[in-house]
Amino acid sequence: MRSLVLGFVLLAAGCCGYSTRSLLPSHLRTVAVPPATNTTTQPGLAEALTDDLTSAFTSDRTLRVTNTEAADLVVNATVSSYNRTASSYTGDQAVSAYELSVSAQVNARDQTRDEEFYSGTASARVTYDPNAKAEEVAAAEALKKLASEIVRQVQIAW
């Protein structure tokens, strides 16, 4: 019986694990977020995404945010789409909810190794009631989600 319990403990110890260590290569310690660009007709998205992306990397604390010249990794983002579509209606065909989606092209460059680290598209969407929330507030929520998704994608890219 004792050997059975010991075997179970060893098996469990070998199968489970948790690490606070980053998935990123060890030479990547700092990140820079140059001003984002915006190819949509919706004003203010680039500035808001830049701020949200900087905040998301700062909050995550895996990489320290610094300037472009000192950074190991430079993450460039371009807001490539912004769409608001009606997602539900009342009985009299009035819009009761909108879905707002925003996407960005992301390129992360490893300046230490002088190579592309990650390239891809990130998206986020929110649904909101136009009677309870303004489109600008929903857009700010979507951009915060987008920034978090960009950080997640960069971290798992390697």
Image: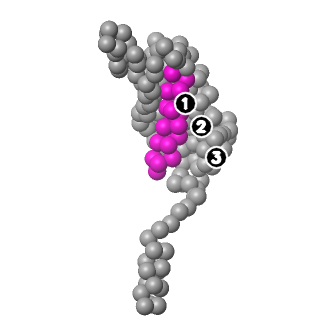
What amino acid type is highlighted by mark number 1? Lys
Real-space Cα separation, disc 1 to disc 2, in angstroms: 8 Å
Find numbered disc 1 in the image and state the secondary structure of the residue it sits on. helix
Determine which residue is flagged by label 3: 61
In the image, 88 versus 124, the foreground residue is 88
Instruction: Check whether the beta carbons of the residues at disc 1 and disc 2 lie within 8 A of each other.
Output: yes
Alpha-carbon neighbours of circle 3 within 10 Å: few (<14), some, or many (≥20)?
few
Which residue occupies the foreground of this view, 46 or 28?
Answer: 46
- The tag on residue 144 is 1
State if disc 3 and disc 1 touch (CB < 8 Å). no
Cα separation, mark 1 vs mark 3, equals 16 Å
Q: N-terminal of the two: label 1 or label 3? A: 3
Give me the C-alpha separation between circle 3 and circle 2.
9 Å
Residue drawn at x 35%, y 14% is 90
Residue 96: quarter of image: top left
Q: Position of residue 63 (x, y in %)?
A: 62, 46
